[in-house]
Image (cartoon, rainbow, N blue to C red):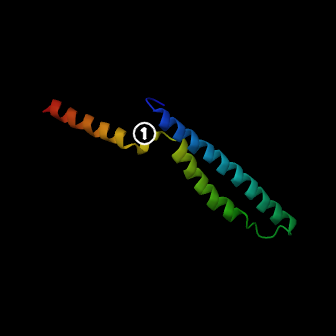
Amino acid sequence: MQNLSETQLRELARKRVEFRRHLVVFCVINATLWLLWWMTGQGYPWPIWPLAGWGIGLVFHYIFDFSSPKLFSEEEEYDRLRHMKEEKHVAQ
């Protein structure tokens, strides 16, 4: 977490807390769906579909909130492009 401002740290903390809330809701709702399935005769395992769909969304939520913030940073991309440009000038 290099050179993150106080505002950026607060935003990152907010996003990570939101992810944890999302994870708890995911677990509670999906456990309830599986319980309903079990209590109603255990036929076709239909709860697998909401579990899979929502699980995919949860994985992306995790990736965006816990991966490096540099991945989607305009400042980092600008610095990378500027560095590439400077290397070309040195090589010529």
Instruction: Name above or below for residue 20 compared with residue 30.
Output: above
Residue 41: x percent and y percent?
Answer: 86, 69
**Viewed as shown, does residue 2 lie left or right of 23?**
left
| Picture quarter with the C terminus | top left
**Would residue 69 appear left or right of 41 to someone viewing this image?**
left
* Residue drawn 61% across the image and 47% down it: 18
Element under label 1? Answer: helix
Q: Quadrant of residue 83?
A: top left
Question: Who is closer to the viewer here, 18 or 42?
Answer: 18
Kind of residue sitting beneath label 1: Lys
According to the picture, the residue beneath numbered tag 1 turns out to be: 70
On the image, the x and y values in percent for residue 17 come to 62, 43
Q: For the point 75% across and 54% down, which residue is it?
A: 28
Say few, some or many: other residues with alpha carbon within 10 Å of mark 1 (under 14 / 14 to 19 / 20 or more): few
As drawn, which residue projects farthest toward the front?
7
Residue 25 horizontal side relative to residue 7, left or right: right
User: Is residue 30 toward the left or the right of residue 83 in the image?
Assistant: right
Taking the spot 21% from the left edge, 37% from the top edge, the residue there is 85
Vertical relation: 33 (above or below) 17 = below
Query: Disc count in the image?
Result: 1
Which percent across, then down, holds residue 23?
A: 67, 49
- The residue shown at (36%, 44%) is 74
